[in-house]
Amino acid sequence: MALSPLRPSEERAVEVMPTPQPSRTYALNFDTGEVGGMIDGESAIRQAIRKAIVTARFRYLIYGFEHLYGCELEDLIGQDLPIELLNAEIPRVISEALLVDDRITDVYNFTLSREGDGLYVSFFADTAEGTLREEVAV
């Protein structure tokens, strides 16, 4: 009678606490497209941040529409938008892309700078491995 409805719900239900999963993954070389070796911890989170930012959201079927993986930066790039709008939108789309990852708890202190035709974004991310400072060329 282990599942008897006559027993109180406290005795029938067992609360399971989630355990953090390792972030071990393959190392990606973004310049050459090669995959090799294994990384974990801070390196894996840094790679996940970069991959989430460079992957266009809703473009690749492998991620599906329900996963919300990737970033919507390409909607902003190439348009002649005022820096005030970029200062508001780029932090929003990067934060949305990164906060899907349960290892990342906060993204803040965004700094945007233009150098020639390039736009560079730096920010801090609070992660399971501590606070990381990231820089991205957009």
Image: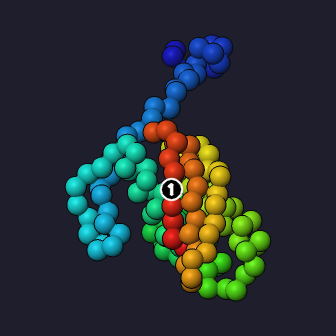
Q: How is the image coloured?
A: rainbow
Give the quarter of the image for residue 117.
bottom right
**Residue at horizontal 76 percent and vertical 72 percent from the top:** 85
Answer yes or no: is residue 74 visible: no
> Which quadrant does the C terminus fall into?
bottom right
Residue bearing the label numbered 1? 134
Image point 56% across, 48% down: which residue? 125
Q: Residues within 10 Å of mark 1 (few under 14, many from 20)?
A: some
Q: Looking at the image, which is closer to me, 21 or 131?
A: 131
- Left-right relation of 134 to 75: left
Exactly how many numbered labels are in the figure?
1
Residue located at (51% from left, 51% from top)? 133
Query: Looking at the image, is 58 positioned above or below residue 91?
Result: below
Q: On the image, which quarter does residue 58 sit in? A: bottom right
* Figure check: 80 above or below 23: below
Q: Nearer the viewer, residue 78 or 5?
A: 78
> Which of the pair 24/17 is nearer the observer?
24
Image point 41% across, 57% down: which residue? 47
Q: Secondary structure at mark 1?
A: strand
Confirm whether residue 135 shows in the render. Answer: yes
Residue 93 percent location from the top left of the image: 65, 64
Residue 3: image location, x then y, percent: 54, 20
Q: Position of residue 37 (x, y in %)?
A: 22, 55
Q: Out of 42 and 1, give the one closest to the viewer.
A: 42
Q: What amino acid is at disc 1? A: Glu
**Is residue 121 positioned above or below 123 on the image?**
below
